[in-house]
């Protein structure tokens, strides 16, 4: 499903705002994300790094887990803002986590220029392993 102009504006704004809370003292790469749930709510998140680098979590996963923790398990769209001149798509780990709750979610990637990517999760992660494979 493609997003309406107002959904794009709201999601992009929430993702950009979330990047302000980013804790990224090691990479200095401050990322923000926002998810739109089937109930129409928006939840946001930022990347949170750790001195033990392996424990760093991306902005997308923070946003997804925040939505799930609030009882919202159906994701319609996920936006990510990166402080880059070109939009960048979520990492593989985040694609897998988004798939769990939004296998056909629209992923919107925004950056410091007007360029953006709008693509569906199933295009980013074809033939994904998911909850159905365990049944
Ligand atoms: N990062 C994200 O939060 N999301 C992405 O889509 C790409 C990478 C974070 C992880 C780490 O804190 C920093 O960006 C550099 O990789």
Image (cartoon, rainbow, N blue to C red):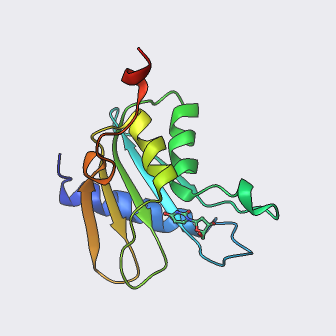
> Which residue: 41% across, 34% down?
101
Q: Which residue is painted at 55% across and 67% down in the image? A: 19
Which residue sits at x=32%, y=60%?
108
Q: Nearer the viewer, residue 75 or 122?
A: 122
Q: Horizontally, is 22 left or right of 44 in the view? A: right
* Rendered residue at 56%/54% (across/down): 45
Q: Is residue 131 above or below residue 126?
A: above
Does residue 80 appear left or right of residue 61 in this picture? left
Q: Give the number of callouts.
A: 0
114 above or below 39?
A: below
Q: Quadrant of the N terminus?
A: top left
Residue 132 vertical placement versus 70 (above, below): above
Q: Is residue 38 left or right of residue 53?
A: left
- Decide: is 66 above or below 25: above
Return the x and y of residue 32 as percentages of the image width and height.
52, 63
The reply to whether residue 42 is in sight is: no
Nearest the eye: 20 or 81:
81
Residue 41 on image: x %, y %? 40, 40
Find the residue positioned furthest to the right.
Answer: 51
Classify the position of the C terminus by image quarter: top left
Residue at the limit of the structure toward the top, as seen here: 135
The answer to whether residue 83 is seen in the rendering is yes
User: Looking at the image, in which quadrant does ligand 1 appear?
Assistant: bottom right
Where does residue 84 sit, x and y in percent of width and height?
A: 45, 81
């Amino acid at each position: 499903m493609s997003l309406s102009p107002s959904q794009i504006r709201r999601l992009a704004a929430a993702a950009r705002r979330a990047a302000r809370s980013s804790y990224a003292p090691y990479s200095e790469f401050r990322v923000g994300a926002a998810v739109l749930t089937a109930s129409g709510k928006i939840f946001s998140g930022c990347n949170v790094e750790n001195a033990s680098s392996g424990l760093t979590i991306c902005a997308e996963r923070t946003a997804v887990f925040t939505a799930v923790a609030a009882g919202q398990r159906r994701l319609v769209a996920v936006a990510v803002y990166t402080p880059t001149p070109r939009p960048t798509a979520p990492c593989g780990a985040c694609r897998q986590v988004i798939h769990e709750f939004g296998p056909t979610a629209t992923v919107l990637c925004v950056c410091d220029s007007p360029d953006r990517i709008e693509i569906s999760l199933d295009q980013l992660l074809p033939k994904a392993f998911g909850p159905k494979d365990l049944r």
